[in-house]
Image (cartoon, rainbow, N blue to C red):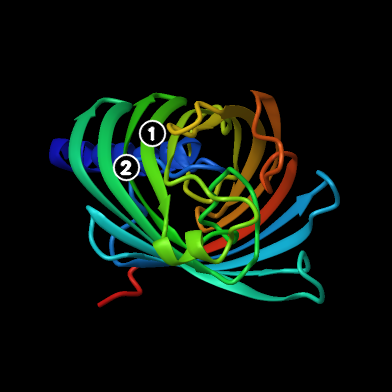
């Protein structure tokens, strides 16, 4: 019976580790960890700006976990910021995890990511936002450390608009590129003791999000607290608010933003 007890303990440990990754599901950034292999996720994100009456945006999204190291997101953007509610553009995000160091109730991950986006919105700002406002590309690195109920993550990247976008917006020339950086923390509040995968997860997050224009030296830093509920290890609900803490890039979409998101994951859907 010893082998049976050991097997049960191993299964419980693996289940607990899957549940513990809940505090890595950051609301405003992606961790270095990937979604489950051969799984699919469906998101709907609502964003509301109370900065200069910019309006509302919906972001439907499909996510695929190709294998344990590679995943891809496809997004569409719709808003009422240029008139009646309508389609704005699309984005494709890819992430490859190249480092995994595992321990008991802890692990460290590193991944490389990239994004390419298209937008038809005539948006004028020194900021580059590839999730609805600009056409361009982004690449970077992210590292995530899990320590039992606390998960810490940092990323650094570079965003650049396409040359064609520079030419069609002469009224306010866009920067050639922006440095992006973030620091995120997530903490698992509930359950206090793991019993089964059906237990609700309640996570709290605090994220620091910043960008710098190397050409002008202008920059900003936002703070983004959020709460998250996960039900049955499949249904995820996020609520957060992002606001500027410091900076001198004022005319931007992301400055004061309320976010609400619903996500549902289906496991072992990819054969």
Q: Nearer the viewer, residue 32 or 83?
A: 83
Q: Image point 60% across, 45% down: which residue?
A: 200
Instruction: Give the mark count.
Output: 2
Can residue 92 be seen? no
Q: Image point 45% across, 64% down: which residue?
A: 117
In what quadrant of the picture does the C terminus appear? bottom left
Q: Image point 67% across, 44% down: which residue?
A: 252
Q: Is 138 on the left-hand or right-hand side of 87? A: left
Residue 55 pos. (x, y %)? 80, 58
Q: Secondary structure at mark 1?
A: strand
Q: Is 210 on the left-hand or right-hand side of 50? A: left
Q: Earlier in the sequence, mark 2 or mark 1?
A: 2
Q: Secondary structure at mark 2?
A: strand
Residue 239 pos. (x, y %)? 70, 45
Q: Nearer the viewer, residue 122 or 10?
A: 122
How packed mark 2 is, by other alpha carbons closer than 10 Å (few <14, some 14-19, many 20 or more), is some
Residue 139 pos. (x, y %)? 32, 48
Instruction: Look at the numbered discs 2 and 1 and tell me whether their residues touch, using CB distance below 8 Å.
Output: yes
Q: Nearer the viewer, residue 61 or 34?
A: 61
Q: Which mark is residue 131?
A: none
Looking at the image, residue 169 lies above or below residue 99 = below
In what quadrant of the picture does the N terminus appear? top left
Q: Is 78 on the left-hand or right-hand side of 93? A: right
Q: Image point 27% across, 35% down: which residue?
A: 109
**Residue that carries the numbered disc 2 in the rendered image:** 140
Q: Is 24 on the left-hand or right-hand side of 89? A: left
**Residue that carries the numbered disc 1 in the rendered image:** 155
Residue 105 pos. (x, y %)? 33, 26
């Amino acid at each position: 019976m010893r082998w049976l007890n050991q097997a049960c303990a191993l299964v419980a440990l693996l289940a607990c580790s899957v549940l513990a990754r809940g505090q890595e599901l950051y609301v405003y950034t992606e961790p270095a960890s990937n979604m489950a292999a051969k799984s699919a996720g469906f998101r709907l994100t609502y964003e509301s700006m109370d900065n200069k009456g910019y309006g509302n945006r919906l972001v439907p999204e499909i996510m695929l976990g190709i294998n344990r190291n590679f995943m891809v997101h496809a997004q569409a953007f719709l808003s009422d910021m240029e008139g009646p509610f309508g389609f704005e553009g699309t984005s494709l995000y890819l992430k490859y995890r190249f480092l995994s160091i595992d321990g008991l109730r802890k692990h460290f991950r590193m991944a490389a990511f990239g994004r390419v986006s298209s937008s038809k919105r005539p948006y004028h700002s020194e900021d580059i936002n590839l999730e609805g406002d600009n056409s361009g590309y982004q690449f970077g690195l992210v590292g995530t450390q899990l320590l039992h109920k606390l998960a810490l993550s940092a990323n650094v990247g570079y965003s650049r608009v396409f040359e064609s976008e520079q030419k069609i917006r002469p009224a306010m020339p866009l920067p050639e590129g922006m440095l992006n950086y973030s620091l995120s923390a997530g903490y698992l509040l509930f359950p206090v003791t793991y019993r089964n995968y059906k237990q609700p997860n309640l996570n709290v997050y605090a994220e620091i999000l910043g960008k710098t224009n190397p050409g002008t030296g202008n920059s900003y830093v936002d703070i983004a607290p959020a709460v998250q509920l996960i039900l049955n290890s499949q249904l995820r609900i996020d609520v957060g608010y992002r606001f500027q803490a410091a900076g001198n890039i004022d005319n931007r979409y992301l400055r004061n933003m309320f976010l609400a998101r619903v996500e549902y994951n289906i496991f072992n859907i990819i054969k």
